[in-house]
Image (cartoon, rainbow, N blue to C red):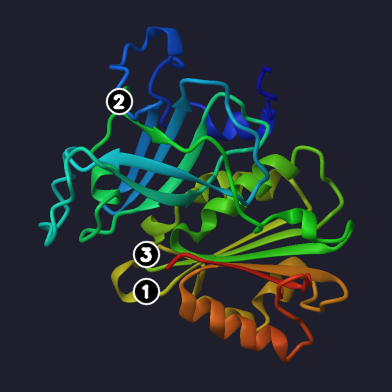
Amino acid sequence: MPAISCPFIDAALDGWWWCGQILSATTMSENNKSPYNAAVIGREQINPQLLVLRVQPDAVMFDFKPGQFAVLGLLGSELRAPEAASEEIVPEPDKLIRRAYSIASSSVEHRYVEFYLALVTSGQLTPRLFALRPGSRLFLGPKASGMFTLDRVPPGKAIVLIATGTGLAPYLSMLRTMLVNETQRRFVVLHGARFGWDLGYRGELESLARLRSNFTYIPSITRTDQDSHFHGYTGRVQALVEQGVVEKESGVALDPAQADVFLCGNPEMVQAVKSLLAAKGFKADEPGKTGTIHVEEYW
């Protein structure tokens, strides 16, 4: 099935970081014993700590809902990025190290999946993922999973997406999928990071905000003393929510009758915003009962 093109997103990404043609599975010769079933077809290292990878499976691409995650894996024998710390426990070289990561690409993109990754210098997998280059082989799980999806929000309600760091990833998938056709429903992204150069996808999100009147993008940083070039909101995300920045910038009321809120990223931020929203009448999801606050914690 051919990928559905999104002209305004394609224009925003033209010349961005694409690393050559899509690799054909027929050009890949692998030892039958290899657990690898996918290849890196593009990468952008935003800074030494942040990386975007595009991964193409050898087989037919699995279907997924925006907001879901997939599993990536590499053998313990793979090289680690130079920025990584020494491993206290060296993994077995012939065993896969696997971790789940939110998908950032559109669900109508059937050629590859995209991931937005933060380097955990003491970790086992991300230092190896950061060492990959276009053409590198890796393991990609055969399906996507997760309940952090938009289908739990009633039609017509506004959607407020709040994240820190790479917690932005599932929101990229949602926006890249939904903003193609959704012209009435309001979407808001509030994204916090330490520095302006940590605000991954900022250019794309600013372009979308200019092109779609129903989308508002609010970036914020906390290390203002070290980033004098950033002009925008400063301070922690939870403080901006408390100050009414979402309502001021978007016109979307933080009212559970009018909006659902998604939270993804630092658990401290998640807990603080949940408390602020609870005071406004929002309720978090519970087993078997959908609320108006939906949470994905990254650690």
Which residue corresponds to the image point at 11% horizontal and 62% vertical from the top-left? 88
Q: Are the residues flagged by discs 1 and 3 in contact, CB closer than 8 Å?
A: no
Q: Is residue 282 left or right of residue 43?
A: right
Which numbered marker is on residue 224? 1
Residue 16 is at least partly visible in this image: no
The residue pinned by badge 3 equals: 195
Of the residues tagged 3 and 2, which is closer to the observer? 2
Camera-side residue: 298 or 157? 298
Local secondary structure at mark 1: helix
Q: Position of residue 255 (x, y in %)?
A: 81, 79
Q: Position of residue 164 (x, y in %)?
A: 48, 66
Cα–Cα gap, marks 1 and 3: 7 Å
3 or 2: tag closer to the N-terminus: 2
> Which is nearer the N-term, disc 1 or disc 3?
3
Question: Identity of the amino acid at label 1?
Answer: Thr
* Residue 162 visible at all: yes
Q: Residue at x 44, y 62 (%)?
A: 165
Position of residue 141 in the picture relative to residue 147 (left or right): left
Of 3 and 77, nearer the camera is 77
Disc 3 element: loop
Q: Residue at x 27, y 34 (%)?
A: 132
Which callout, 2 or 1, points to the residue nearer the camera?
A: 2
The label number, if any, that marks residue 240 in the structure image: none
Dot 2 corresponds to which residue? 34
Estimate the x, y position of residue 299 in percent, counting from the top left. Answer: 42, 68
Q: Earlier in the sequence, mark 2 or mark 1?
A: 2
Q: CA distance from mark 2 to mark 1?
A: 47 Å
Pointer 1: residues within 10 angstroms few (<14), some, or many (20+)? some
Specify few, some or many for label 2: CA neighbours under 10 Å numbering under 14, 14-19, or 20 or more. few
Relative to 118, residue 268 above or below: below
